[in-house]
Amino acid sequence: MGCGLRKLEDPEDSSPGKIYSTLKRPQVETKTDTVYEYVLLDFSLEGSRPTVQYVSSLCELPQALQPYYTQGYVLTALHPIILSVGRSRSLPFSLLYRAILARPRPSKQAVSMCHSVPMLRVEEWPLPGESLTGDTVRALIDRVNSSARGGVRFIGSVLQQVSGVGNGRVHSPKRGCRSPSHTPPRTPPAERELEENIHSPDLRLLVFFHSWAPGCAPLDSLGCQYHQGALSMRVSRKGQVVSALEADWLELTAAYYRKGWSLVDSFVYWDTPKGEPVPRSLEGLFVYEERSTSPPANDTIVVEQWTVIEGSNVKTDYGPLLHTLAEFGWMLTCVLPTPIIRHDSDGNLATKQVVFLQRPVRNQAAGQQKNQAMSAKSDVSSRSVSRGVTSHASPEELSPSSTGGIGGFPVFGGGYPSALSHLEEGGFEQEEGKAEVTCM
């Protein structure tokens, strides 16, 4: 099977995925007071598919996800599955998006409270220019902070290109997105600059917020502030197309996790301006959330994982590992999609995402010692990754018929055997003074 098929980009690293962490496996598997439950939903903007829900615009997500919100789930991340950046035409499934929802596992003693059900809001922000720039993103973060002062909490964003091929391209929405009813206390200069350039935008940003009824918001969700952090990657290319990437994920995020901040969004400048030399590195910005309370420092897990699409179904992805880590209190906060794409040996389309999870440090003193080692990293052997993440997945285990759903939506990755149970014990050995890394 697959003989004679033209491959797209064949990354230099052929392993199913890599995992970086501040903890060893025994620490990753330590139980916490909080256990999460995840639902992974795929949506298509280009017509109905057998196992994917159709929406004409991502502006319809608040209504589409409402059945889950009534059960205590909330949106934690949203990302396109396929990025066609640097390619001359749109690729299959370039209008396919994934929403990840989470909730703490309900306790028998849990009492229903009004702040347990926020409302999902989405705003459409026109952007100037043909691509993201550092100045544009900083202006966006200023605008996010302005909105946060009005009582909402930033969840994340998705970039849309109205015409042509690009990062997360979608058709123009048939109807406008609803905006939060609050009025920002002031309009910063950066926001005015954005509004002055909305006269025929090429790019639009869909920005997602949570809001609550008056008096019902959790205390730690009020007065959040959002900060930018550097995002730098070394890349390999084939022509204009990114074929592989490498980044010091722990070093990039360590200082922010020590403060107890959460990584909530990312912006990468994938496109190379016309006429400029093709760079060997790419820059961008992470967006971190600082809550009004003083949370403890966080440990982190970063997963570079392939998603394989067979036909119209997701065959392999980060879902099984996510469900396993949920049992140990790990919260997914951000997914960075990449334009790295290839065909596997069976001709299925495969693309890579980078998934970020965090969990409060259980022992603050021990956490301070671990944080001293976070600036270094170590890759995981491909054999350990293969056994731990992808080798046991089957289309039946990932299909809606075996995992169930709510309101007709498929739920991928449920009922999967523990991804940690097949790990090789030898993968957790480390040299004295080296960063602690968990093999998955």
Image (tube, rainbow, N blue to C red):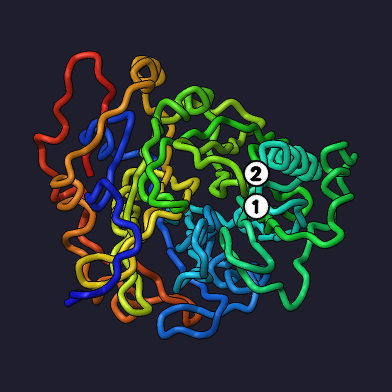
Q: Quadrant of residue 365?
A: top left
Q: Residue at x 23, y 44 (%)?
A: 440
Please identify the quadrant where the N terminus is shown.
bottom left
Labelled disc at residue 115: 1
* Vertical relation: 181 (above or below) 297: below
Q: Nearer the viewer, residue 383 or 342?
A: 342
Q: Residue at x 43, y 32 (%)?
A: 360
What residue is shown with label 2? 218
Of the numbered discs 2 and 1, the one sitting upstream in the chain is: 1
Q: Quadrant of residue 188?
A: top right
* Vertical relation: 224 (above or below) 395: above
Residues marked 2 and 1 touching at CB (< 8 Å): yes
Labelled disc at residue 334: none
**Image location (x, y in percent) of residue 230:** 55, 30
Q: Tell me the SS state at disc 1.
A: helix
**What is the spatial separation of the Cα atoms under label 2 and label 1, in whole angstroms?**
6 Å
Q: Tell me the SS state at disc 2.
A: loop
Neighbourhood count class around disc 1 (C-alpha, 10 Å): few under 14, some 14–19, many 20 upward: some
Neighbourhood count class around disc 2 (C-alpha, 10 Å): few under 14, some 14–19, many 20 upward: few
